[in-house]
Amino acid sequence: MTTTEEKITPEPAEAQAENIEEVESDPESLLEFDTTGCIEPDTIDEDVQVMGELDKEVSQEEEDQADEKRMEAMSQFSEGNFDKAIELYGAAIKLNPNSALLYSKRGQAYLKLNKPNACIKDCSRALELNCDSAPAFKFRGRAYRLLGEWEKAARDLRQAVKIDYDEQSDEWLKEVQPVAHKIEQHNLKLERKKAEREEKQRQEKVRIAKEAHAKSASEAPPPEMGDIYKLLQDPEIMAAFQDADVAAAFQDISTNPANFMKYQNNPKIKAVLEKLSSKIGPNFPGFPGPGGFPAGFPGANPTSTNVPPATTDDDALD
């Protein structure tokens, strides 16, 4: 039986410990079933199991000779001389390597000798040549069963019964189907639990990232007042505060930061807020959100170094 190794990205030690604990504590993580009838995998002898050249152009004479060898092989098979049958099928395959029947028949002979891997190799070639070969599905399915590969066995035997029903195929299918179904359900549960665990880990990472971001924002020092007044010399900011509505709005906000909410739908004020936020960040003293100004800062009024008193007509600014 061949196995395939997958490269798995190592998980953090905490996650690995949690996963191991979950698997060990979960009774569904262990599957037990009867392996009676399973055998040790065989080693393929490539010198004996010749596969032929698929691109060979077969003449009519070679086809006829291959048929003669096939008939001789079938005769030897019926007499229980399976090694001789394999030899004759090999000679026929050399003559006509494009016959799916020859491969499936030789696979059957290998199956009789309890050589499931050799059988699987022949039947797989037969299915390459004819994807609807019921005998190839049948014998390969039985070979998988001998190796204890229950899911593959059930899949192949289902196909064999579907394409061309016979009692032996159906009997073999009924033998492997309960175990295969149990494994399939078990794997579905494991996949579901894996997905749930990964989603839980993802949510935890998001939570940790949010907390770290919030902590970083709360610990970030606000801009120095000297930086604030330097900012007011910025040509764009100075131009914005030449507008009486803007100056009045910021005077209102600096007096009471809660008043910031009144101006959220005012495009003129909102544009200035966004401009300030882009220049000095979110930790601007005076009001929550994009930023704010303390009362009485210079440069906020076109004619005075002090901001004029807030207007009482708030509706005019909305």
Image: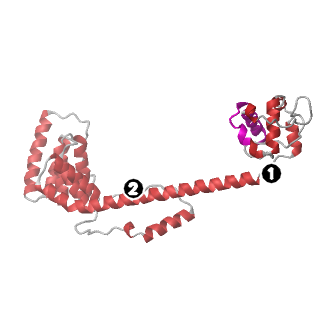
The residue that appears at 13% across and 38% down in the rendered structure is 63
On the question of residue 181 being in view, the answer is yes
Tell me if mark 2 has few (under 14), some (14-19) or many (20+) residues whose alpha carbon lies within 10 angstroms of its own.
few
Query: To which residue does mark 1 refer?
Result: 221
Look at the image and tell me in which quarter the N terminus lies.
bottom left
Q: CA distance from mark 2 to mark 1?
A: 55 Å
**Residue 151 relative to residue 302: left or right:** left
Q: Which residues are magenta?
A: 260-282
x, y percent for residue 92: 16, 45
Residue drawn at the location 32% of the way across and 59% of the way down: 185
Please state which of residues 36 and 266 is positioned toward the viewer in this rendering.
266
Q: Quadrant of the C terminus?
A: top right
Query: x, y (%) of residue 149?
Result: 29, 59
Specify which label sits upstream in the sequence, 2 or 1. Answer: 2
Q: Amino acid at mark 1?
A: Pro
Residue 118 at least partly seen: no
Quadrant assignment, res 108? bottom left
Label 2 element class: loop
- Residue type highlighted by circle 2: Thr
What is the chief secondary structure element of the magenta stretch?
Answer: helix
List x then y, in percent, for residue 52.
Answer: 24, 43
Which labelled disc corresponds to residue 4? Answer: 2
